[in-house]
């Protein structure tokens, strides 16, 4: 892969400002002045037919008149002129454009039509656009300030990407006072073309960027956003602020789940799976960036607090409890060490109050004791200036204790106050120890460390769409849904809903529908007593609200009376509702059962979301639920369950034995399968799902369905692409040996590194076009933690007698920015060449690419790699010289 296509735009060596002006307050004038004031060292051109010169520079009537290669056009002209100007830029082979102008999609239907024309003009010529309606871009290290902001940025290691230009300006103003620098500041505006996903791709590999800050107002392409976020978060910390909530989905929901799960819940779930963390305020965002970019990492969430004053320790403890952090319980040996080092009146617990006369030696001893405690995951050292306090020496003691520790635990400092502690804070800054001004900010920073670690573990999870247990009857469930949709119905009846659940091997209670009192009597005699009776109506979600539930019916006479009363009450309460009789089922008996709810809703941005929590009639009052994006596996499911209050009741509780946790996990796995395989499912409620020590059963269920959109990718409806387990195959080689061909997984890092090391120097040079012995940690992450939506890596592995897999080949492709073509690479171990592996892998890789809607595969091969060139010709590639490098040959094939 060559450099990212945004590299030439964001590090432009030639810039043209279209709409440059001499009028002081004109946007084009401010942009041109900012570039001059920043000291931009590339070629800078003004384009405006009204002027001969702009700020002392020659002005050209149009961009084609410049007669030079232009990397970036910065455009500030009336919106109605943009489509033509974009076409001119494309014809002049400009690499990219930043469009500041407003008046497009945000302005209504006419603006949307204008934006469509501009997009079409860009597509015709391959021009990439940032904006429109944006503040612009700053790249301080390249002395680029292509914005109309009154603020500027100094070089640093933070990247800021924001949809709001106003927020960019405010953050820049705040950062200037805080002496915070940036590697990139980019305002996306309406993000018509270049969006979060594109910039995250670029920043993931940008050597100037250590941490990434995002300000998000809304997501247009969820799959691209998640893909870019996951790619970036694998390489460096990503901190996100999101404003705004959309309630439309909740208002239109037809289920408990749809009404309870808000857009913010889903956004948090998406960030968790992407390995990013969320901040609520700008101050928190920079605190998170400071702690995460320091390299500190926490293995758990138990914090020890060292303080020379009781009040700040209590404040820090309160905030830790609010954030669900653990207050570390110091072990006896730690208490003994502290007793020896501290005065008799120390607090004898956590927070460790070392008293107001604490000297540097006391800080050092307390810190070393806490860091050595196996029950402590991180330490916060706090100081308030008092008469006996030596702020500087105490800071040096904390620095020495932290850097001299062999335990690898994070240490944070909070030196409270102003001028008296300023020098101590400077010492922390110089030595790279994270420090904060308030107890709350310090504890929040540690919480970001623990959240980042937890989310990074989730990032490594790559569940498949289907479990390894007894296969689900996917086609049977789909037939039930298609029948309902064919009849114009979107809400399945209770019996249909339970049939869909049963098709996915979820235990359900037997249900019979009755349209009359006599049919109800027949059903009752078949099922046996006691019975539950419920109203059957596609228009009534909350049955108990209309008197539509009767429990513990024990006689035939009660069946008749209940039927008549229920139909009458429902008709009076909801006269517009279609009443289809009742459903009857035998009462589910469980002495120690807990009522739970499992649900699915379709978020308008991120697609299907799975929820879990307390069940019963009070679910919307209790609001006890957690959500996760599918696909799920056991690790994700256990985290999902643990985030609810009801989780504590699933264990042994007073006289009740623990529930069957395996059965509960299996239900959630099956629901994950359902939403992966059935894009028709829009909403689902299982409420209640009764679970006890012996098992579980879905007592009531409701499924809402809709026609899915047509797409070549069966998982296009999901924000996170599942592990493509359908691509796993056992391939018998011509010599009788069998290889397993499968997509690569994150846990393959070890065998991938071993494979690269085993290659000959020549094979490594041919593959990477440079001399190298092994993959760097960054390359290893990129090669094994892939996004199956936009890249694929098929590895061939053999399992020797030891049972450990050995990788013998890999073929991979990465989708190009045009989303229609891809670039491939392939390498086979030296000892395994000439046995047909390369041919088989290339055919498999091409089939996958074609199935994803790609129509062109291309790659670069060294001219001396004759074996690879022969392979490419055998599998149908056209081979041609590279016009820019005679040592490189291009291989291209239409799919």
Image (spheres, rainbow, N blue to C red):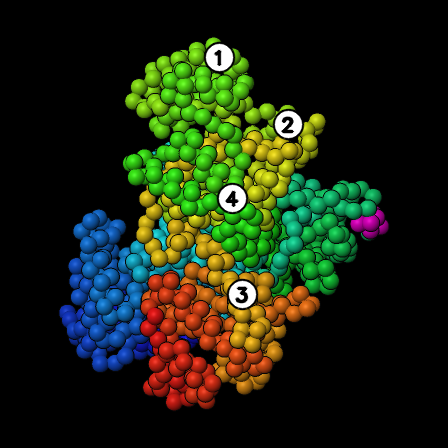
Residue mark closest to the camera, 4 vs 1: 1
Residue mark closest to the camera, 3 vs 4: 3
Which is more N-terminal, label 1 or label 3? Answer: 1
Q: Residues within 10 Å of mark 3 (few under 14, many from 20)?
A: few
Q: How many angstroms separate mark 3 from mark 4 (CA)?
A: 26 Å
Q: Which residue is under mark 1?
A: 556
870 shown above or below 100: below
Which is more N-terminal, label 2 or label 3? Answer: 2
Q: How many angstroms separate mark 3 from mark 1 (CA)?
A: 60 Å
Residue at position x 58%, y 42% in the image: 665
Which is more N-terminal, label 2 or label 1? Answer: 1
Q: Which residue is under mark 3?
A: 730
Q: Which residue is under mark 2?
A: 592
Whether residue 337 appears in magenta in the rendering, the answer is: yes
Q: How many angstroms separate mark 2 from mark 4 (CA)?
A: 24 Å
Residue mark closest to the camera, 1 vs 2: 1
Q: Position of residue 338 (x, y in %)?
A: 80, 49
Whether residue 767 appears in magenta in the rendering, the answer is: no
Q: Position of residue 194 (x, y in %)?
A: 34, 62
Question: Mark 3–mark 2 contact, CB under 8 Å?
Answer: no
Position of 654 compared to 210: left or right?
Answer: right
Q: How many angstroms separate mark 4 from mark 1 (CA)?
A: 37 Å
Q: How many angstroms separate mark 1 from mark 2 (CA)?
A: 29 Å
Position of 63 compared to 283: left or right?
Answer: left
Quarter occupied by the C terminus: bottom left
Of the pair 376 and 522, the residue shown nearer to us: 522
Position of 539 compared to 124: left or right?
Answer: right
Residue at position x 38%, y 42% in the image: 479
Q: Which residue is under mark 4?
A: 670
Q: Which residues are magenta?
A: 333-340
Residue at position x 32%, y 23% in the image: 577
* Circle 3 SS class: strand
């Amino acid at each position: 892969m060559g450099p990212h296509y945004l590299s030439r735009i964001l590090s432009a060596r030639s810039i043209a400002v279209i709409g440059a002006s001499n009028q002081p307050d004109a946007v084009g004038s401010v942009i041109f002045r900012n570039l001059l004031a920043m000291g931009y060292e590339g070629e800078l051109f003004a384009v405006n037919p009204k002027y001969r010169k702009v700020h002392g520079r020659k002005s050209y009537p149009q961009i084609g008149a410049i007669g030079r290669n232009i990397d970036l056009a910065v455009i500030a002209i009336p919106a109605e002129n943009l489509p033509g100007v974009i076409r001119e830029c494309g014809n002049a082979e400009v690499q990219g454009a930043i469009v500041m102008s407003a008046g497009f999609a945000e302005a209504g239907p006419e603006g949307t039509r204008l934006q469509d024309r501009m997009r079409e003009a860009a597509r015709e010529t391959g021009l990439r656009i940032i904006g429109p309606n944006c503040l612009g871009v700053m790249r301080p290290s390249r002395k680029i300030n292509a914005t109309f902001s009154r603020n500027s940025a100094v070089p640093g290691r933070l990247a800021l990407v924001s949809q709001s230009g106003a927020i960019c300006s405010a953050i820049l103003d705040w950062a200037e006072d805080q002496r915070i620098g940036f590697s990139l500041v980019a305002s996306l505006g309406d993000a018509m073309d270049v969006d979060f996903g594109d910039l995250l791709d670029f920043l993931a590999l940008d050597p100037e960027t250590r941490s990434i800050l995002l300000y998000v107002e809304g997501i247009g392409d969820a799959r691209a956003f998640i893909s870019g976020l996951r790619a970036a978060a694998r390489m460096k910390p990503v901190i996100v602020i999101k404003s705004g909530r959309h309630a439309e989905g909740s208002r239109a929901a037809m289920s408990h789940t749809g009404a309870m799960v808000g857009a913010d819940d889903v956004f948090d779930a998406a960030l968790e799976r992407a390995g990013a963390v969320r901040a609520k305020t700008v101050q928190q965002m920079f605190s998170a960036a400071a702690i995460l970019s320091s390299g500190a990492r926490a293995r758990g969430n138990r914090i020890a607090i060292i303080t020379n004053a009781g009040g700040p320790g209590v404040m820090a403890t309160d905030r830790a409890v609010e954030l669900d952090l653990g207050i570390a319980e110091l072990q006896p040996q730690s208490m003994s060490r502290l007793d020896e080092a501290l005065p008799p009146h120390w607090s004898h617990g956590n927070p460790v109050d070392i008293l107001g006369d604490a000297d540097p030696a006391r800080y050092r001893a307390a810190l070393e004791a806490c860091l050595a405690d196996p029950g402590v995951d991180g330490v916060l050292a706090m100081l308030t200036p008092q008469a006996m306090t030596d702020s500087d020496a105490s800071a040096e003691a904390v620095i020495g204790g932290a850097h001299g520790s062999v335990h690898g635990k994070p240490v944070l400092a909070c030196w409270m106050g102003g001028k008296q502690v300023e020098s101590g804070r400077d010492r922390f800054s110089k030595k790279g120890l994270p420090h904060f001004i308030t107890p709350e900010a310090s504890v929040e920073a540690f919480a970001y460390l623990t959240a980042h670690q937890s989310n990074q573990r989730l990032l490594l999870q790559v569940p498949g769409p289907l479990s390894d247990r007894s296969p689900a009857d996917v086609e049977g469930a789909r037939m039930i849904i298609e029948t309902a949709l064919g009849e114009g119905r979107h809400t399945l009846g209770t019996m249909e809903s339970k049939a869909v659940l049963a098709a996915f091997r979820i235990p359900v209670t037997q249900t019979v529908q009755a349209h009359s009192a006599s049919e109800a009597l027949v059903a009752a005699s078949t099922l046996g007593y006691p019975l539950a009776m419920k109203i059957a109506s596609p228009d009534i979600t909350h049955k108990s609200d209309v008197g539509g539930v009767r429990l513990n019916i024990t006689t035939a006479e009660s069946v008749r009376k209940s039927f008549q009363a229920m139909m009458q009450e429902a008709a009076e309460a909801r006269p517009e509702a279609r009443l289809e009789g009742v459903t009857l089922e035998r009462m589910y008996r469980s002495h120690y059962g807990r009522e739970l709810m499992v649900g699915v809703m379709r978020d308008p941005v991120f697609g299907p979301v799975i929820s879990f929590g307390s069940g019963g009639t009070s679910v919307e009052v209790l609001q006890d639920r957690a959500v996760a994006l599918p696909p799920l596996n056991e690790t994700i499911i256990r985290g999902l369950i643990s985030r609810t209050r009801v989780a504590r009741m699933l264990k042994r509780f007073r006289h009740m034995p623990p529930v069957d946790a395996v059965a509960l996990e299996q239900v959630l796995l099956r629901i994950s399968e359902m939403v992966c395989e059935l894009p028709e499912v829009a909403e689902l409620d299982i409420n209640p799902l009764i679970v006890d020590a012996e098992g579980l059963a879905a007592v009531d269920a409701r499924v809402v369905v809709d026609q899915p959109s047509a797409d070549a990718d069966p998982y296009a409806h999901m924000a996170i692409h599942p592990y493509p387990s359908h691509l796993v195959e056992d391939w018998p080689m011509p010599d009788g040996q069998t290889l397993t061909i499968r997509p690569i997984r994150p846990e393959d890092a070890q065998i991938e590194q071993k494979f690269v090391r085993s290659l000959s120097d020549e094979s490594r040079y041919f593959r990477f076009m440079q001399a190298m012995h092994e993959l760097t940690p960054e390359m290893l992450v990129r090669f094994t933690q892939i996004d199956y939506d936009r890249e694929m890596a098929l590895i061939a592995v053999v399992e020797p007698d030891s049972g450990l897999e050995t990788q013998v080949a890999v073929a991979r492709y990465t989708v190009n920015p045009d989303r229609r073509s891809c670039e491939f690479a392939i390498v086979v171990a030296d000892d395994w060449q000439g046995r047909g592996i390369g041919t088989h892998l290339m055919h498999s890789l091409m089939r996958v690419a074609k199935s994803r809607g790609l129509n062109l595969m291309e790659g670069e091969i060294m001219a001396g790699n004759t074996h690879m060139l022969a392979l490419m010709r055998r599998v149908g590639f056209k081979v041609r010289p590279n016009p820019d490098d005679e040592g490189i040959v291009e291989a291209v094939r239409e799919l």
